Amino acid sequence: MNVGQSFRLAIKSLLTSKARALLTMLGIIIGVAAVIVIVSLGTGMQTYMNSQFEQVGVNLIQVMVYEQPGNRNADADDFYELAEKYPQYIDSVTPALTISGVVRHGADEYERTSVTGVSETVYNPETSQTVNGEQMEDGRFLSYVDVERNQHVCVVGSYLNEAMFGGRGVGQSLTIGGVPFTVIGTMRETADSTEGSGDDFIYVPYGLAPQLNGTAGGSGMSGYLVASTSEDTSSAAKGVIESMLFRIYEDSSWYQVITMAEMMDMMDSMLGVLMTILIVIAAISLVVGGIGIMNIMLV
């Protein structure tokens, strides 16, 4: 029997028992489809994550400092001095303190809104955007006077601007942790303008963070955002930051410095592991389907 006869005989056998042939092939069909879908989703997720990191800025460096009670601790002035000393590596520095106060406007409450205390340097007038890639929509950003005097003003994202004020937020008022604030600026949409998204945020002067957190004596942890002059100088900028912090604390366990490039690598590694696990699970379906087909052929 030649190949052509074998092929025709196989087709005839399949057409004779359509239901049996379909059920037999179902395992292979599901397995192949699962592998294709998982690989496509993983690739899409990786592309999306990389685009989000690139939008924030691959030259951004996040610094977390844990305060030592009663000892010398790094503060904003130390980072400002470092930026002046190494302008070839560091472009800008801003404190970035997360605040836990509940946001309210009238009877409405917004529990998922991200509230961050920052300085005026988080916004670059030359590029017309923040270090996180957000751009002004209306009004103005926090000024040096606002930050220096701890004035109760804020800048809100596009979600709050629409949800709270119908797109006319500048000049309106809201409360954070019961403390009233006046909206002086709104930002353009960068995500999908939904609750809890990247457009659901508020910027306030960082000096108000302890008051809003209810920790006037210090929260025990400080955060800073440092923008290096370019992606190529981010490693050098990280090095000078770590050197300064080590001189102050003499122990690297009191601080953490991580670049966006490192975060991208970490996310890629995590997605790679997850993809491998899912593909192995899908491959099991292929093996089971193959065994099923072989079993029917033997029968």
Image: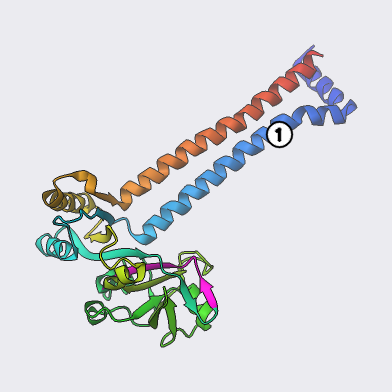
The outermost residue toward the top is: 1
Q: Nearer the viewer, residue 38 or 67?
A: 67
Q: Residue at x 69, y 23 (%)?
A: 290
The disc labelled 1 sits on which kind of residue? Ile
Front residue of this view, candidates 190 and 20: 190
Query: Label 1, on which residue?
Result: 29
Range covered by the magenta-colored residues: 108-119
Residue 90 sits in which quadrant? bottom left
Residue at x 48% of width, y 85% of height: 168
Q: Position of residue 186 (x, y in %)?
A: 41, 79
Q: Main secondary structure of the magenta part?
A: strand
The part of the image, by quadrant, that contains residue 288 is top right
The picture places residue 93, in percent across and down from the top left corner, at 22, 64
Please provide percent x and percent y for residue 146: 26, 80
> Would you say residue 196 is visible in this rendering?
yes
- Residue 179, relative to residue 233: is it above or below? below
